Amino acid sequence: MSPILAALLAVVLAATGPAGTQPESPPAPLLVPGRPSPSDSLRLSRQERARRYYLRGRELERTGAPAAAIVSYRLALRDDPDLPDANFRSGKLFLAVDQFGEAVAAFAAEVERHPGNTEAARELGLGLSRLGEHERAVAQLELLTRRAPADGASWRALGFAYLGAGRAQDAEAALRRAVALPPPSAAAHRDLGFVLGTTGRADAAREEYRRALAIDPREAGTWLNLGNLDRAQGDPARALEDFRAAERSDSGLTAARRGQALALLDLQRPEEAGATYRRLLRLAPGDLESRFAAVRLHAALGRGDVALELARDGVRHDPGSADARLMLGMALEAQGSWRDAARELRRSEAFAPDSARRARARGLLGTLSRQASDSLRAVFAADSAEAARALVPARGIR
């Protein structure tokens, strides 16, 4: 999620408060015999206002303004906490920007007020699983499948939750229920294939992927899983074609480009792999895992200038990232720019969110200092002391 969108969502949540809360009610007016109750008029007014906020949210969703849509849904719920679908749609928007905690809260509110909303109950279970609350997810989805045993999507969600809980056998059983129910689902066959593959049954997994593609030849996730399976079985040429098919089905699927790069490396075609990584990073500049791989690859190919520029792009994209600073420090060190490298490693240590990352940056800085010439060691020592004095007030006690 972009920093701007994150900041806007924070303002939304602070300004509107929990979904379903209402503003303080005005004093009750005096009743006039023979006229409708003013409280009834007020209630109707609030319901109408809530409906308009809801419709505005739908329009904002349609035009690609998710944060503003969430604002409208929250305002609608303040006027009418029982308004159907508003919590559910807020939850879906939070999911789209990986705000799983907020999504779960929204789905839970929808299920509490509208227990018959099967889709909201399913999304609640999936959200809990993504948060790592696997047992709660399993309990929620087992309840849902008992209530709606003919809903294949709910069985598929339960399979996902079982797999997250480490219950592969139960996951397989749930997914077999899903593929047996109408209508035919490519996603259910794909997920069953994935579970079979993780339990070492490659041929059975491949057969499920074949069935998924028979239902939907452009199901990108199936092609992606098939590529991973072929690569794991030592067939990078076939895997490369699978990953290319995944990209043709979904041009925004970064994992498909990453898979192509890895398959090309397996095929000893590093220049093409490097070009694929660069193409991936134009699509997903924040993908640090791929950026690290691209920097290392270009350095190994003797393209230190390209490696350095890729690392600088990473810092430009996220200046406060400890990992991006670490990557730039390593690229500078490979180019022999030791003093600049040391500066970036110290910044990485300062920005590191945990002790493991701080230790990694500190270790690389120590290695760099030991490798430096005697004439540079004094510079490193002086710079390190100066950096330490500057950082202590900002970072406080570690």
Image (cartoon, helix red, strand yellow):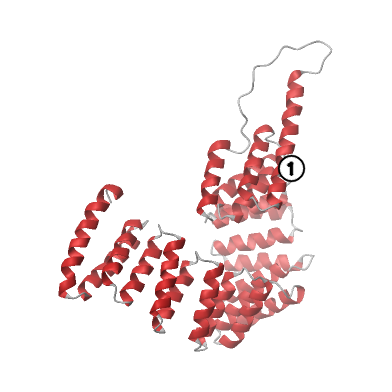
Q: Is residue 22 above or below residue 244?
A: above
Residue 78 picture location, percent across and down: 64, 34
Residue 104 picture location, percent across and down: 59, 49
Q: Residue at x 74, y 46 (%)?
A: 116
Residue 190 picture location, percent across and down: 67, 71
**Residue 182 placement, left or right of 278:** right
22 or 11, nearer to the observer: 11
146 or 123, nearer to the observer: 123
* Amino acid type for the residue under numbered disc 1: Leu
Q: Is residue 318 above or below residue 49?
A: below
Q: Residue at x 32, y 64 (%)?
A: 344
Q: Residue at x 36, y 73 (%)?
A: 331
Q: Residue at x 22, y 61 (%)?
A: 384
145 or 1, nearer to the observer: 1
Q: How many numbered callouts?
A: 1
Residue beneath disc 1: 55
Residue 357 showing in the rendered view: yes
Give the quarter of the figure containing the N terminus.
Answer: bottom right
Secondary element at image label 1:
helix
Residue 201 showing in the rendered view: no
Residue 365 picture location, percent across and down: 26, 67
Residue 192, by quadrant, is: bottom right
- Crowding near the residue tagged with mark 1, few <14, some 14–19, many ≥20 C-alpha atoms within 10 Å: some
